[in-house]
Image: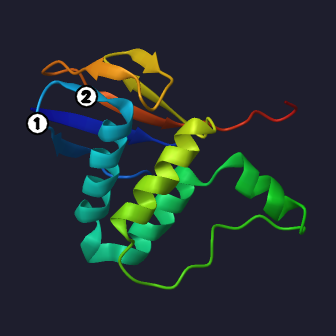
Amino acid sequence: MRVEVRSRVPGGDRLPDVLVELAQERTTVRELIRAAVAEQVRAWQADSSRCRALLDRQYLTDDDIRAQAATGVVRLPDRQPGVPDADDEVTRAWRAFERGTFALFIGGRQVDLLDEQVVLRLGEPVVFVRLTALVGG
């Protein structure tokens, strides 16, 4: 089964929409994130520095931001150029999902747990939405 995965980030560049190939229509949120992030990394291999910046923007957690804010400045991680490692990015995305850094919608319904079983339907998009705290709370 092929499913379209879209990423949305308020106010800026976002990861590319990708088509993800899954063995069947029933899967877990964990497997869906793994497949989507691996495909996002593959889609941007030709422009690895841009890929790195977009992945960092999508999956930088609030904890990461708070830790940096304590030092007086918040920046995207200073990483060495090169193709991002898909396994590392998948692990980071799982952690970001568990911490509420981004929400995941399947067919318009938000899912909340990595091990939740979901059924994907042909033509229903999957959307990763980067959440951003509002000023003042």
Vertical arrangement, residue 39 with respect to residue 83, above or below: above
Residue reaching furthest to the front:
115
- Dividing the image into 4 quarters, which one contains the C terminus? top right
Q: Residues within 10 Å of mark 1 (few under 14, many from 20)?
A: few
Vertical arrangement, residue 98 with respect to residue 80, above or below: above
- Dividing the image into 4 quarters, which one contains the N terminus? top left
Q: Dot 2 lies on which element?
A: strand
Q: How is the image coloured?
A: rainbow
Q: Would residue 125 be found to the left or right of residue 100 on screen?
A: left
Q: Would residue 81 be found to the left or right of residue 42 on screen?
A: right
Q: Quadrant of residue 24?
A: top left
The reply to whether residue 6 is visible in this rendering is no
Residue at 36% x, 42% y is 33
Nearer to us in this view, 90 or 101: 90
Q: Quadrant of residue 3?
A: top left
Residue at 74% x, 51% y is 63
In the image, what residue type sits under mark 1? Ala
The reply to whether residue 134 is visible in this rendering is yes
Q: Give the residue number, with chain letter if any, for mark 1.
A: 23
Residue 78 percent coordinates (x, y): 62, 78
Residue 136 percent coordinates (x, y): 88, 32
Residue 29 percent coordinates (x, y): 37, 31
Q: Give the residue number, with chain letter if any, for mark 2.
A: 27
Q: Would residue 101 be found to the left or right of residue 30 on screen?
A: right
Instruction: State yes or no: discs 2 and 1 in contact (Cβ < 8 Å).
Output: yes
3D distance between C-alphas at marks 2 and 1: 9 Å
